[in-house]
Amino acid sequence: MSAYIEDLDAALIAKAVKEGSISALEVAQASLDAIDKRDPQIHAFIQVTPELALKAAQDIDNARAQGKELPPLAGVPIAFKDNMHLIGSRTTCASHMLENYESVFTATAVQRMLDAGCVPVGKLNMDEFAFGSSTESSYFGHTCNPYDIERVPGGSSGGSAAAVASGMVPLTLGSDTGGSIRQPASFCGVVGFKPTYGMVSRYGIVAFGSSLDQVGPFGRSVHDVALAMNALAGRDERDCTSQPWNIDFTADLNSGVEGMKIGIVSSLNNAEGVEAEVVDAINKAAQNLTAAGAELVEVELPHAAAAIAAYYVLAPCEAFSNLARFDGVRYGHRPNDARDLADMTSRARAEGFGPEVKRRIMLGAHLLASGVYDKYYYPAQQVRALITEDYKKAYEQVDAILMPTSPHTAFKFGELSNPTQMYLSDMFTISLNIAGNAGISVPVGFGSASGLPIGAQLIGPAFQDHKLLRIAASLEASYEATQCAPGFTKKGGLLS
């Protein structure tokens, strides 16, 4: 089993476990073996949880032996971004501030995956407190891209993407505040889905930007992501923003795109800074959708260019508020030799947070200050309203919009040392979080020059996630599998 765990997607594993051709324990052990073998090179995991995994797997095997009906994802190994609470694990947010924090409850999204039969094998690396686009800011060290270990996997959910791409687990969860699921999915050649805001409960997820955050799955296929969404979606009384939802995301997955209209935004696709091989890949994706029966329609998003500016006002303000709780009093890093409460609090934050976290806290504090708030925060909210209205008008003409996920392929560690350059990596993803709509990154091959994975982003109207997945499945079907295979060695990549 351990020799081919990376060849099985979640659907195949669940089917095999239900039929009894393999046991959940065999699958769990194979995943743990793959982590032991591969993660020293990739460093996707902050913590591995073999006790939790083996117990959950044994419970599934016992249930099958007793003739009980198994849940839909029974025996499927899963790992969670380390900003998601899970009893029996640490939740560190990849920060020195929470280095030793033990979870005392389990996030709703995590619990729903466990209730669906998934086996928890560990917690995944990320940019500290999800502030970043490369997973370089993690206190525990960076994660490597399985296609080239000298390059980033993207961020902030870099560990979640790399764990799937390297064959260690078939499913992971990440969070997306400005592109943190879709961009790493593109860099690592896997499928990453950011649901509509409110589709998935945020309870138990350490907040970054409460009006922007959304939990979503990574998988080797659109089908696996749809299976995960069946478990994740729906109302949670502990999250007032979550909405009731009861639909099978796999029901119409293979119905195709005949008669659908797909929007193209030429001004964005050809914007300054977009690499030629990315443009070529998106143009080919558009041709494939046309060949499948869809009609391409030119649409406009006139305020999309202002999305990054608005985001880096709104997000730091929300982050400043959400991170105020980390003061060393109730939990988190606390210096042992503090003179008094004020000294303890200031030093706890100075020592516990990394440079990017401090940068965003300070920016948020400045933007919310008297005399500054009216000048920046209100206009940013107005821009948010305009961007949301732009999308609404576009969806009156089309079923979804196709654009790049990222303007470039995975870059080398340290290559984007300027924070502004890093922020521009999310130029195609941020507007979606501002508007709250759904988006998915689908692998569409490799760059002709770089040889690295490229993802196409499909974005759709709010709460039409099932239709978006259907379009993504049609696009995916027009390509051969692009996920990282065992023994992939291109440019010093993952070795089997």
Image (tube, rainbow, N blue to C red):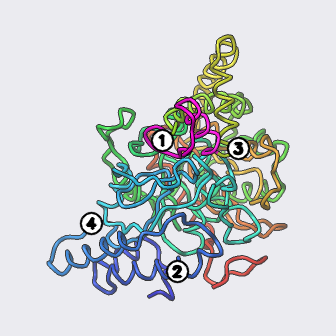
Q: Secondary structure at mark 1?
A: loop
Mark found first going from the N terminus, 3 or 2: 2
| Residue 139 is inside the magenta segment | no
Horizontal and vertical percent position of residue 114: 33, 61
Residues at marks 2 and 4 touching, judged by CB atoms closer than 8 Å: no
- Write the residue at 58% across / 62% down: 159
**Quarter-wise, where is residue 64 in the image?**
bottom left
**Amino acid bearing label 1:** Thr
Q: Tell me: 470 left or right of 150.
A: left
Q: Tell me: 415 left or right of 71.
A: right
- Write the residue at 37% across / 49% down: 107
The foreground one among 401 and 156 is 156
Residue 34, which numbered label?
A: 2
The foreground one among 266 and 272 is 272
Horizontal and vertical percent position of residue 69: 19, 70
Question: Which residues fall within the magenta stretch?
Answer: 329-353
Structural distance between the alpha carbons of marks 3 and 1: 31 Å
Mark found first going from the N terminus, 3 or 1: 1
